[in-house]
Image (tube, rainbow, N blue to C red):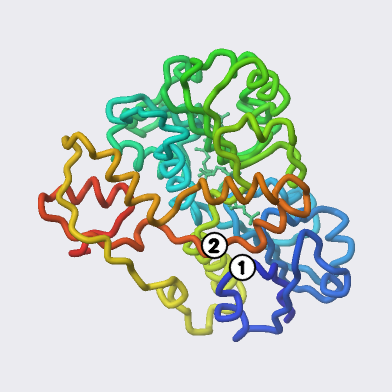
Amino acid sequence: MNIVIDENLPAAQTLFSGWANVEYFSGRDVPERLLAHADVLLVRSITGVGQPVLERAPNLKFVGTATIGIDHLDTEALSARGIEYANAPGCNAISVAEYVLAAILTPEVRQGRDWRGKKAIIIGAGNTGSSTGRKLTALGMNVCYVDPFLEGGHDSRCFGPLSMIENADVVSLHVPLTESGPYPTYHLFNEAVLASLRPDTVLINASRGAVIDNHALLNLLTQERRTVVLDVWEGEPHVNEALVPLVTLATPHIAGHSIEGKIRGTYALYDVLHAQLFPDTPEIPLQQVLPSDGIDGGCWALTEQDNDYVDQVAKLVHQVYDPRVDDRAFREHGLTAEGFDDLRRRYHTRRELSVVRLSTEQIDCGRIRALGFTVESD
Ligand SMILES: NC(=O)c1ccc[n+]([C@@H]2O[C@H](COP(=O)([O-])OP(=O)(O)OC[C@H]3O[C@@H](n4cnc5c(N)ncnc54)[C@H](O)[C@@H]3O)[C@@H](O)[C@H]2O)c1
Ligand SMILES: O=C(O)[C@H](O)[C@H](O)COP(=O)(O)O
């Protein structure tokens, strides 16, 4: 059995090498010589798996993507060939949520605002949207969701129509890229929707680039200053260079790139393959491949009522992850397709907030945990 794996799936060697012959590839394209004998192919979102790949892979039985998004797999073509496929739902939801939290806490985006009591509208109430909503609620924001597929069900959270964005302080996008069905998301944020936003609203896209019409956004930003955070771009790895200087924080599709998120992605595929192909082999527990170290965050005596609550949370969050570092690297090196891919391939080891262990004096553990930190007694 031959398993062909993108070199950027951490923990792959530990998880898969006991089962089969493991071979790695680098970059977007899988070399033909590897496809020729691949039984299993494990990719990231940069590798499109459609007819051209399938034609070169006569033995392929399983394709896995260690990502949430699945828009790079031609699922019809895979099903037509009887090839099983899987993704990694929710694997990097915490990472995406922490990206959004860290972004709105930067002075450039925050512009002196105290986020407590302000309104956040989350578009898409699935894994990344819900995780983001929980963190923004823990920051003290009032959170509502737009999700026509979930609204009206048993979910008791605040839901409403897209027009709620007209009165939002923060709008954050967390939908898959879809071009068909009752609520397609391709260019969901078109010229008219963008124009309906208040001039002081922060707009964040960490879903897929084409959910926002990038030309319409460029037109708007050319006319007036807005606060926009873009992690994803229409046409990646090619980005609209004129758009970048007008965007407040610009990053190369790394919102989900915490090391924990990537490992969970690899593990999700391990889990599926273990159940389907190797059920008789001993299962390696997730904890064995996740990092287990921690940073002492000291003693936390603050509650949400304290005047400097948001400042203190910002300090703690940016100690672990500050998106301005990625923004600077992107502006310097990420404007070409090669630079964009390179920044992602060589991404630094980014940790999730849970790496910080706090002991609390004046206890508001629920809120601290909801932000993502580890409370010492955990
Ligand atoms: N930037 C990154 O690094 C990064 C990381 C992870 C995921 N993503 C992207 O984010 C997307 C969402 O991830 P997720 O884990 O939250 O997915 P999910 O499937 O858990 O949730 C998506 C939600 O969007 C809702 N939805 C679909 N169409 C909608 C519409 N027109 N309007 C409002 N809601 C709609 C669905 O009902 C669902 O609840 C992924 O598909 C992927 O493309 C990006
Ligand atoms: O869909 C996802 O999970 C994310 O977009 C993911 O973080 C993409 O990262 P990539 O696989 O391209 O490294």
Quarter of image, res 115: top left
Residue 273 in percent (x, y) is at: 59, 71
Q: Please tell me in which quarter of the rendered image ligand 1 is found.
A: top right
Task: Look at the picture and state if 317 lies above or below 218.
Answer: below
Task: Look at the picture and state if 249 lies above or below 24.
Answer: above
- Left or right position of 96 against 195: left
Residue bearing mark 1:
9
Residue bearing mark 2:
262
Tag on residue 21? none
Helix, strand, or loop for circle 2?
helix
From mark 2 to mark 1, how far is it between C-alphas?
A: 7 Å
Residue 348 in percent (x, y) is at: 56, 62
Dot 1 surroundings within 10 Å: few (below 14), some, or many (20 or more)?
Answer: many
The type of residue carrying mark 2 is Lys
Comes first in the chain, label 2 or label 1: 1
Question: Cβ(mark 2) to ligand 2 < 8 Å?
Answer: yes
